[in-house]
Image (cartoon, coloured by chain):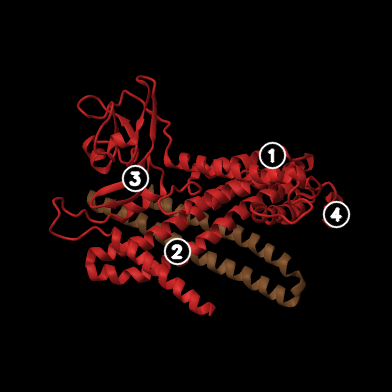
Amino acid sequence: MAAWRLKSLMVAVFSILGGLVWASEPPAGDGHAAPQKKFNASEVIFGHVLNGHEFHFMDIDGHPISIPLPIILYSPERGWTGFMSSHFEHGHKNHNGYAMLNEHSIHEMKLDPKKFSVGDIVAVNEEGHYDASVTVYDLSMTRNVVQMLIALILFVWIMLKVAARYKKGEGVKTAPSGMQGMLEPVITFVRDEVAHPNLGHKAEKYLPYLLTVFFFILINNIFGLIPGSANVTGNIAFTAVLGVISMLVILFSSNAHFWQHIFNPPGVPFLVKFILVPVEFLGIFIKPFSLIIRLFANMVAGHIIIICLISLIFIFGELSAVAGWGASPLAIGFTVFIYLIEVLVAFLQAFIFTMLTAVFIGQAFEGEHHDEAHAAHH
Amino acid sequence: MDLLNVILLEATANAGGAIGAGLAAIAAGIGIGQIGKGAVEAIARQPEAANDIRSSMILTAALVEGAALFAIIVGFLAMVL
């Protein structure tokens, strides 16, 4: 009975996904005025994984379906400028003395492809040529910013709503209900499995930070999985800020024994200290750096895999329409499989970031009691 | 000669990046496989400790995977830079 329902569900899911592929495939052949552009996989992949000035969902018949976002520019020479990104018409038009670069215009304006990339906003003069005398600072609300703010508002709203219910007394002496039921096991998990084992008696002090980091990363990971959304956690700037904040928390909770272990490790032969002390000192920075890279690489790799598998359909479609159709079920099957793994990875990476932060904080203030054990050992 | 140099350099950079990422994947597979083996054997010896062993396994796997992902990022940078 359950197997029958599962099979119907899978038929429905695959039919819908196959239908979506069919619907979004641009109609082939002769009705077209413009020639069909060759499918550029790397442009699609990087367009999805990097930041952008609009939420782009799909292209139908060469027309992009997207939500434009505000562009805010500051130039010391020209002052503040603000307008919607739709004025740029995806890089085809200049607006108000600024241009958004696409591959064509990088060539035309003879700009160095290593310094300028597609989507950058540069200042142009009246003829439309690059104006090198004007520096532009792009402070726009890009899609990463907007999505992060949406996730933040949702996160704060949910947490405050649940906290208000607890303060009223619901779910304190009775069983938790509603949203409390979803959050309480997760919060108790972080408190009992992550905070208390690593932080001991100081767990309550660090619990707000650990819970914030866990839920913030989790909700941004989950938002990034929605098709058409921005890749917030797969952005090195985002993870770098989280890593730096964790590093500051770790450093501010260190005690004298932590620094003594780094600069004068007990029980170590004198000559080995010349190697060990630099390594230990670098370790202070490398441990948060690994947190940064781990979260960034996991998220961006997952997104790239999903987009690559879907792009396989279009790459095969370039060879022949039959090959494209034949590749569809396989590619979609793999994509669904990887998608489910990515949901797991979303939770896992939030958990790992939180747990490693707790471990490093614990390492920073532990250690008065085993110095004698060290000396006795060696 | 210049064209040949450029073609060779770019192709080598891409090939180097791809080979590096492949090696990283092999290394991650071997490393995490051994973690899994140790964890499963430990649980078989002492089923009551399954929860502790499982959390140690996940923690260690994340650290090893972090190292593999360093290598993948470097491979990617080799292609792009």
Closer to the N terminus: mark 1 or mark 3?
3
Q: Which of B25/B12 is in front?
A: B25
Please identify, in this view, whether the residue under mark 1 or under mark 4 is nearer the observer.
1
> How far from the left and from the top, in percent, is residue A235?
48, 46
Label 1, secondary structure: give it: helix
Are discs 4 and 3 both within one chain? yes
Vertical placement of residue A346 versus A274, above or below: below
Taking depth in this image into account, of A59 and A261 the one nearest to the observer is: A59
Mark drawn on residue A373: 4
Q: What kind of residue is marked 3?
A: Ser
Q: Is residue A287 visible?
A: no
Colour representing chain B? brown
Q: Point out residue A24 in the picture as x, y percentages from the top left corner.
A: 29, 58
Q: Nearer the viewer, mark 1 or mark 3?
A: 3
In the image, is residue A75 above or below residue A369? above
Q: Which amino acid is tagged 4?
A: Ala
Task: Give the residue pinned by disc 2.
Answer: B22
As measured in the structure, the alpha-carbon distance from the residue carrying label 1 to the one carrying label 2 is 36 Å
Which of the two marks, 2 or 4, is nearer to us in this view?
A: 2
Mark 1 = which residue? Answer: A251
Taking the image as shown, residue A143 lies to the left or right of residue B55, namely left
State the SS at label 4. Answer: helix
Circle 3: element type: strand
Residue A66's mark? Answer: 3
